[in-house]
Image (tube, rainbow, N blue to C red):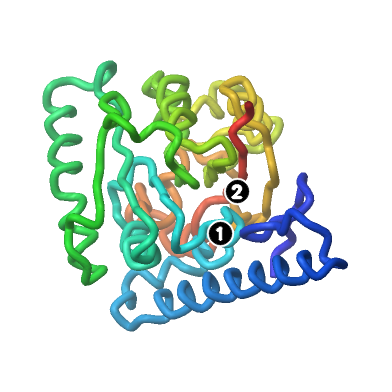
């Protein structure tokens, strides 16, 4: 198992609030362990489903079991996923949340940057999201919802347990919407809510011209500082999704590597041998 670097007391889904040496503490620990086991078993069953035959080809790069555990997800959580366009994650989380949980697609805020055609595409994505997730989960579309971060429904703020941002922060920076989007997500989280980020990672010495998001890569230290500036505190970071084979200096950016393979057949075997990008995996909590 890849090394996980912790910056808080624990990286499990929940941590009992009382000493395990007391009867109350032992009971809390037992409940915690049971909940953790439920999480692991439920996720393992979903990931092993033959229906994921095509999606599972990317598991060796994306490590969904380890990543979602690191983000401290649980089936009864209210979970928001930012920009769920490819729906690889959606096909997991749509089945993962139970009858007490909630899974929401959080789409781009459309008050700035996007032209009319872009706004129409985003609106179409939101409209079909519940039905798309329902189709793979076997549950009714009414169990899922989606909205734009510029049009947050009344009563939604302060209700989310977890929000995840999967390899989208570079686009947010490139479009100059990162501050507004992250602040909107912060508003959605509960006071003890957590936000998980997986992002293509530039080398620490990468120049700004390469690590400004235009190549898909960001420097980890820059991401942490940005999140701290916008009301979050780093809880933990992990090397779950690290790839030391990725030099992170491709002229055509991260899209040179799988799954995009932007150069098509040019040196295809070389890039396939490298695999998908080196990625930071970070967990933040909402700061009071």
Instruction: State the image coordinates of residue 188 (x, y, percent, origin top left).
Output: 43, 34
Query: Along the horizontal axis of the image, is 260 left or right of 179?
Result: left
Which residue bears the numbered disc 2?
281
Q: Residue furthest toward the right?
A: 21
| Mark sitting earlier along the chain (1/2) | 1
Instruction: State the image coordinates of residue 191 (x, y, percent, origin top left).
Output: 56, 35
Instruction: State the image coordinates of residue 263 (x, y, percent, origin top left).
Output: 36, 49
The residue under the point 47% across, 20% down is 179
User: Which quadrant, please, contains the N terminus?
Assistant: bottom right
Where residue 67 is drawn, which disc sits there?
Answer: 1
Where residue 46 is drawn, which disc sits there?
Answer: none
Question: Where 100 sits versus 278, above or below?
Answer: below
Question: Where 38 sits versus 121, above or below?
Answer: below
In the picture, residue 49 is in which quadrant? bottom left
Question: Where 142 sits versus 30, above or below?
Answer: above
- Label 2: how many residues lie within 10 Å, few (<14), some (14-19) or many (20+)? many
| Disc 1 element | helix
Residue closer to the observer: 40 or 279: 40
The residue under the point 14% across, 49% down is 128
Asked if one can make out residue 107 in the rendered structure from this viewpoint, the answer is yes
Instruction: State the image coordinates of residue 65 (x, y, percent, origin top left).
Output: 53, 67
Query: Along the horizontal axis of the image, is 235 left or right of 264?
Result: right
Asked if one can make out residue 252 in the rendered structure from this viewpoint, the answer is no
- Label 1: how many residues lie within 10 Å, few (<14), some (14-19) or many (20+)? many
Q: Residue furthest toward the front?
A: 23
């Amino acid at each position: 198992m890849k090394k996980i670097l912790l910056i808080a007391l624990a990286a499990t889904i929940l941590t009992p609030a009382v000493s395990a040496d007391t009867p109350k503490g032992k009971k809390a620990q037992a409940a915690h362990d049971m909940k953790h086991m439920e999480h692991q078993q439920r996720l393992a069953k979903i990931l092993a489903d033959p229906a994921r035959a095509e999606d599972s080809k990317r598991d060796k790069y994306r490590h969904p079991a380890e990543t979602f555990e690191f983000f401290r997800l649980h089936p009864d959580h209210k979970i928001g996923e930012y920009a769920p366009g490819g729906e690889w994650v959606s096909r997991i989380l749509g089945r993962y949340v139970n009858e007490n949980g909630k899974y929401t697609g959080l789409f781009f805020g459309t008050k700035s940057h996007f032209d009319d055609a872009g706004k129409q595409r985003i609106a179409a994505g939101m409209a079909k999201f519940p039905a798309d997730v329902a189709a793979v989960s076997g549950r009714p579309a009414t169990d899922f919802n989606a909205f734009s971060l510029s049009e947050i429904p009344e009563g939604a703020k302060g209700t989310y347990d977890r929000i995840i941002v999967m390899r989208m922060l570079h686009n947010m920076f490139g479009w100059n919407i990162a501050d507004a989007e992250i602040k909107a997500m912060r508003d959605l989280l509960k006071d003890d809510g957590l936000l998980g980020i997986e992002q293509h990672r530039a080398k620490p010495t990468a120049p700004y011209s390469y690590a400004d998001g235009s190549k898909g890569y960001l420097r980890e230290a820059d991401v942490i500082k940005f999140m701290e500036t916008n009301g979050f505190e780093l809880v933990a970071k992990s090397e779950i999704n690290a790839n030391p084979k990725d030099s992170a200096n491709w002229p055509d950016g991260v899209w040179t590597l799988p799954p995009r393979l932007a150069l098509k057949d040019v040196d295809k075997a070389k890039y396939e041998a490298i695999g998908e990008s080196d990625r930071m995996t970070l967990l933040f909590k909402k700061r009071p």
